[in-house]
């Protein structure tokens, strides 16, 4: 039997559980589904060979994302704790795997320091489409702007309006922590379940509508059918690298954001099947977004005029907004409102999921009640979000490593903490000096459903960590040599 540490930082307390498997799957998927699924995945797909990229991407999801997610879920379910104390409960006496909690806690806070700001942008633009108010002294209304360059300038003015961005960010922080304060079942599960179901309805409805547009055929052909011209224009090495990177980072594994939900479920289902389902939901949103973006681009903008390397979050507020505004005053307003409502749900589902992880840190390590933890963290996140807010306004000239605070926080999480954390989870679950393969295999395969193949032991132990670290190195080289 494994000798486990007894965590003494806080007393044992009743561990809440999800009321249904659907709640677990939707909330876990909500954590994985990010804004990049919508604006970046379709453009990467179009830039790297269409259907060819999709096939390679799906393959890497299976061989990269799913195994790491299984490891993270297993640690969470076996320990019944957050990353703050999960390694401590499972490691052998004298081992130092519990140092991983500092990476996880820091990663979750860093992620929310920038992500809540971007979620606030979604709220601002939803209000713009709902209200269509005048944006200048001449009485020009938001939906009267059709040119992407003008919308880009307007976006710069919007995110540089410090008071407005502070308000939208603080509303996001307060609203999401209030939901979490109601508890796992009554707050997080109930609200996120309806939010995610609404997200799926919105993306399906928008996809169906866009598929009926005049340019839908050409747009979907560009998106899904590889042509000789597109294949000649891409380098297969670039396609593979891009697919590996997108597959790994899309699931947000490595900092305990998924493990926490493993700690809230029972042992009636095996974890491989759950990981595959979560990955499938995440992939569905990514693929479905292309059925919105490409038909709209080919109908109202004459095709795609950008590439993967130049697409950032501003793509949503410039190129896509110019397309929505070109649809006409009524259709464009309705379409834009629904689209940014969809984006807001995608953003808030992630924020709520990560907030729940942060709350669990505090509950595992202190004697505080849930509502007290929420109040403390509302004030803490409000303060911590300010550098990212100011980086596009008051502190726009302040750079570290050539990046503003918003980009730097995102870079540290995506390019450093997620891959390093994933390697730690994988090695902990497979190495003899960690939790070990036998205990991981027993935990991941407990319950009904798909079983994790034992023949993957060598791959998980020796090959997967090397692939992840290589991806990290490649991304760092690309960032600082571009």
Image (cartoon, rainbow, N blue to C red):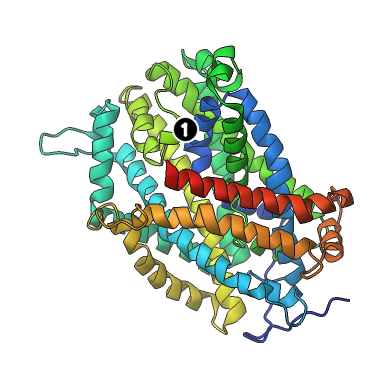
Crowding at mark 1 (Cα within 10 Å: few <14, some 14-19, many 20+):
some
* Near-viewer residue (453 or 451): 453
Residue shown at 48% from the left, 57% from the top? 412
Residue shown at 35% from the left, 52% from the top? 403
Q: In this image, 167 relative to 238: left or right? A: left
Quadrant for residue 189, please give it.
bottom right
Q: Evaluate whether residue 182 shows in this view.
A: no
Q: In this image, 260 relative to 455: left or right? A: left
Q: Residue 68's spot in the image, x, y percent?
A: 70, 53
* Near-viewer residue (87 or 355): 87
Q: In this image, 137 relative to 338: left or right? A: left
For the N terminus, the image quarter is bottom right
Q: Residue 50's spot in the image, x, y percent?
A: 58, 24
Quadrant for residue 140, please give it.
top left
In the rendered image of this protein, does residue 15 appear above or below residue 156?
below
Residue furthest left in the image: 138
Q: Evaluate whether residue 364 shows in this view.
A: yes
- Label 1 sits on residue: 308
In the rendered image of this protein, does residue 387 appear above or below residue 370?
above
Quadrant for residue 56, please give it.
top right
Q: Residue 482's spot in the image, x, y percent?
A: 42, 40
Q: Residue 11's spot in the image, x, y percent?
A: 66, 86
Q: Secondary structure at mark 1?
A: helix
């Amino acid at each position: 039997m494994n000798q486990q540490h007894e965590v003494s930082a806080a007393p044992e307390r009743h561990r809440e559980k999800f009321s249904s498997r659907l709640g677990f799957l939707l909330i876990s998927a909500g954590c994985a589904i990010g804004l990049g699924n919508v604006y970046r995945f379709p453009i990467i797909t179009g830039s790297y060979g269409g259907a060819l990229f999709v096939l390679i991407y799906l393959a890497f999801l299976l061989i990269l994302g799913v195994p790491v997610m299984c490891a993270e879920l297993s640690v969470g379910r076996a320990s019944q704790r957050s990353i703050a104390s999960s390694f401590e409960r499972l490691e052998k006496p004298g081992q130092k795997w519990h140092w991983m909690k500092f990476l996880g806690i820091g990663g979750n806070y860093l992620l929310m320091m920038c992500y809540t700001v971007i979620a606030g942008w979604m709220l601002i633009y939803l209000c713009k489409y709902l209200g269509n108010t005048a944006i200048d002294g001449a009485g020009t209304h938001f939906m009267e702007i059709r040119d992407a360059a003008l919308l880009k300038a307007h976006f710069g003015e919007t995110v540089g309006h410090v008071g407005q961005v502070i308000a939208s960010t603080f509303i996001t922080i307060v609203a999401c922590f209030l939901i979490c304060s109601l508890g796992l079942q009554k707050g997080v599960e109930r609200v996120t379940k309806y939010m995610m179901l609404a997200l799926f309805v919105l993306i399906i409805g928008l996809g169906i509508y866009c598929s009926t547009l005049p340019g839908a055929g050409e747009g979907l052909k560009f998106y899904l059918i590889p042509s000789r011209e597109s294949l000649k224009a891409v380098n297969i090495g670039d396609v593979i690298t891009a697919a590996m990177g997108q597959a790994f980072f899309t699931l947000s594994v490595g900092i305990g954001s998924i493990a926490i939900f493993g700690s809230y479920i029972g042992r009636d289902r095996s974890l491989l099947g759950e990981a595959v389902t979560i990955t499938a939901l995440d992939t569905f949103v990514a693929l479905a977004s292309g059925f919105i973006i490409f038909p709209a681009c080919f109908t109202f903008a004459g095709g795609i005029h950008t590439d993967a390397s130049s697409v950032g979050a501003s793509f949503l507020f410039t190129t896509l907004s110019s397309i929505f505004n070109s649809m006409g005053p009524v259709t464009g307003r309705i379409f834009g409102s629904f689209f940014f409502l969809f984006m807001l749900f995608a953003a808030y589902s992630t924020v709520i999921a990560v907030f729940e992880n942060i709350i669990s840190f505090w509950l595992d390590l202190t004697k505080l009640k849930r509502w007290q933890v929420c109040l403390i963290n509302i004030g803490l996140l409000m303060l911590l979000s300010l550098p990212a807010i100011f980086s596009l306004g008051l502190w726009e000239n302040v750079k570290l490593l050539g990046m503003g605070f918003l980009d730097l926080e995102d870079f540290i999480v995506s390019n450093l903490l997620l891959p390093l954390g994933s390697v730690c989870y994988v090695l902990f679950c497979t190495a003899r000096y960690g939790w070990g393969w036998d205990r991981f295999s027993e935990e991941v395969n407990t319950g009904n459903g798909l079983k994790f193949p034992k023949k993957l032991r060598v791959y998980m132990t020796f090959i997967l960590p090397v692939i992840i670290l290589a991806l990290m190195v490649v991304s760092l080289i690309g960032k600082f040599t571009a």
